Image (spheres, rainbow, N blue to C red):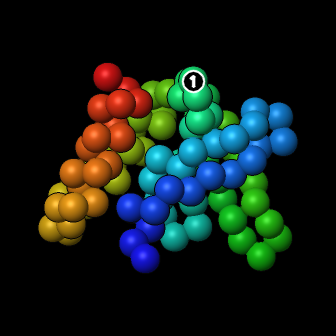
């Protein structure tokens, strides 16, 4: 299964249900609150468990723009188009 096309949710202990926006790297993903999409979290997972790191809107936007650039350079047009739609819904 392609990780860019599957929907992933996590339950944050304080903020409730989070929606995955995109992978940042092999062990980190960018999530946002499901309904308001105003709070962003960098979620890291390793053998010790899951860690939530709050990130600002500007930093989250930069992470998403970097992921879009990498997808475009890699010729992954389907994932690029899907993530572009998420970008537009989230930041514009």
Q: Could you say which quadrant of the image residue 77 lies in?
A: bottom left
Screen quadrant of the N terminus:
bottom left
Residue at image coords 45%, 28%: 58
Say which residue appears at 39% left-offset and 72% top-offset.
Answer: 2
Residue nearest the viewer, comparing 77 with 70:
77
Q: Image check: 91 left or right of 53?
A: left
- Give SS at disc 1: loop
Does residue 37 appear in this view? yes
Vertical order, 27 against 20 (above or below) = below
In screen coordinates, is 1 left or right of 75?
right
Task: Locate residue 63, reporting x and y percent.
Answer: 42, 45
Tell whether 36 sits left or right of 16: left
The percent position of residue 84, horizontal first and vertical second, equals 26, 43
Q: Is residue 55 visible?
A: no
Give above or below for 78 relative to 62. below
> Can you identify the residue that label 1 sits on?
36
Residue 90 picture quarter: top left
């Amino acid at each position: 299964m392609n990780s860019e096309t599957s929907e992933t949710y996590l339950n944050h202990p304080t903020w409730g249900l989070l929606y995955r926006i995109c992978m940042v790297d092999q062990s980190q993903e960018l999530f946002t609150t499901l309904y308001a999409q105003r709070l962003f979290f960098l979620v890291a997972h390793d053998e010790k468990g899951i860690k939530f790191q709050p990130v600002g809107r500007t930093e989250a936007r930069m992470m998403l723009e970097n992921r879009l650039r990498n997808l475009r350079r890699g010729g992954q047009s389907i994932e690029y188009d899907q993530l572009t739609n998420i970008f537009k819904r989230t930041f514009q």
